[in-house]
Image (spheres, rainbow, N blue to C red):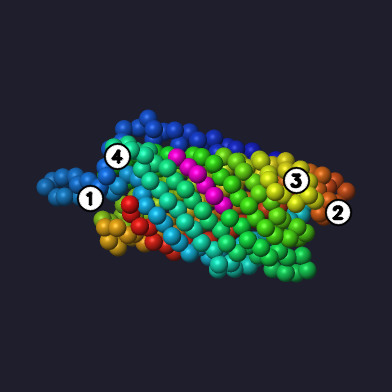
């Protein structure tokens, strides 16, 4: 279980270094997409910060594992269609590469009922600040860091427990303009969430908790004020506890791990 924590801390350290890089890089942010002359041909340069409000449907395949750390298989795989995402990004200053972001996602959170299932919901909130750096006319590096909290409501034994966690989040994203109206991006996030709240008593003491997310996204500009976004996320949540009485084991150890394979279908309104 300690290996999970060390791996995520290493990812978080890399992401924090990446988050600081754009602040010292040479940037050229603009309020509107710029035009670069190349051999007499006008080429549009993408906005260095993808601002606006994204509203998306985010169905997910959810897998949950709850055991004493013995390495058992995941307890269930269930499709969760009633999930969504709202993300608002705004630039900090007209001529600056910095931005702030608020993100809320969640919805139905259920595992298959095999006698020990969970039926509930969860939500995750991110508050981030970051910067964007234009590497070339078609490639942008975006990095941010901030706070993350997640609260889930479930059933304790054999499924998703009821617990809230709070911690630090850092991420880095690379955007590539494939065509004038089509952008492909890759995203890596790591978070350490060691602070629990409003947790059920029989969970015990939280000893380690973290989150890792990988995302691929395709953005298609459909007008000057709207962009369609399609993506795939793989998110892994991990938490380990001591002095837990849920499973009734002698060592009172508890491992809870959740994996979410999610698709995103959304519209971002530019502001």
Question: Position of 46 compared to 87: left or right?
Answer: left
Q: Is residue 110 visible?
A: yes
Q: Position of residue 232 (x, y in %)?
A: 48, 59
Which segment did they paint magenta?
124-129
Residue at mark 3? 241
Q: Position of residue 200 (x, y in %)?
A: 75, 51
* Alpha carbon separation for disc pair 1 and 2: 62 Å
* Dot 1 alpha-carbon crowd within 10 angstroms: few under 14, some 14 to 19, many 20 or more: some
Q: Quadrant of residue 83?
A: bottom right
Tag 4 near tag 2, CB within 8 Å: no
Kindly state the secondary structure of the residue where label 2 is placed.
loop
Kindly state the secondary structure of the residue where label 4 is placed.
loop
Q: Earlier in the sequence, mark 4 or mark 1?
A: 1
Q: Earlier in the sequence, mark 3 or mark 2?
A: 3
Q: Position of residue 179 (x, y in %)?
A: 28, 56
Question: Position of 227 compared to 102: left or right?
Answer: left
Residue at mark 2? 248
Residue at mark 4? 94
Residue at left offset 49%, top offset 39%: 145
User: Is residue 166 highlighted in magenta?
Assistant: no
Image: 178 above or below 132: below
Tell me the chief SS of the magenta region.
strand
């Amino acid at each position: 279980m300690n290996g999970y924590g060390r791996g995520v801390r290493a990812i978080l350290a890399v992401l924090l270094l990446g988050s600081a890089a754009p602040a010292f890089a040479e940037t050229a942010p603009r309020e509107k997409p710029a035009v670069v002359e190349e051999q007499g041909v006008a080429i549009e340069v993408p906005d260095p910060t993808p601002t606006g409000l994204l509203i998306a449907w985010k169905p997910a395949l959810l897998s949950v594992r709850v055991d004493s750390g013995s390495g058992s298989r995941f307890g269930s795989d269930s499709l969760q269609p009633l999930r969504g995402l709202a993300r608002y990004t705004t630039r900090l200053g007209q001529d600056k590469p910095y931005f702030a972001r608020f993100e809320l996602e969640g919805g139905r959170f259920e595992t298959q009922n095999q006698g020990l299932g969970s039926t509930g919901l969860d939500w995750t909130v991110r508050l981030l600040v970051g910067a964007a750096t234009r590497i070339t006319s078609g490639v942008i590096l975006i990095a941010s860091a901030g706070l993350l909290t997640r609260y889930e409501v479930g059933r304790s034994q054999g499924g998703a427990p009821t617990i809230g966690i709070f911690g630090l989040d850092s991420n880095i994203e690379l955007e590539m303009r494939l065509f004038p109206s089509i952008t492909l991006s890759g995203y890596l996030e790591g978070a350490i969430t060691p602070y629990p709240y409003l947790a059920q008593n029989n969970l015990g003491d939280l000893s380690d908790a973290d989150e890792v997310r990988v995302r691929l996204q395709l953005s298609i500009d459909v007008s000057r004020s709207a962009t369609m976004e399609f993506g795939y996320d793989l998110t892994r949540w991990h938490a380990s506890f001591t002095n837990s009485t849920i499973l009734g084991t002698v060592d009172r150890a508890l491992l809870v791990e959740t994996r979410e394979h999610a698709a995103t279908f959304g519209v971002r309104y530019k502001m």
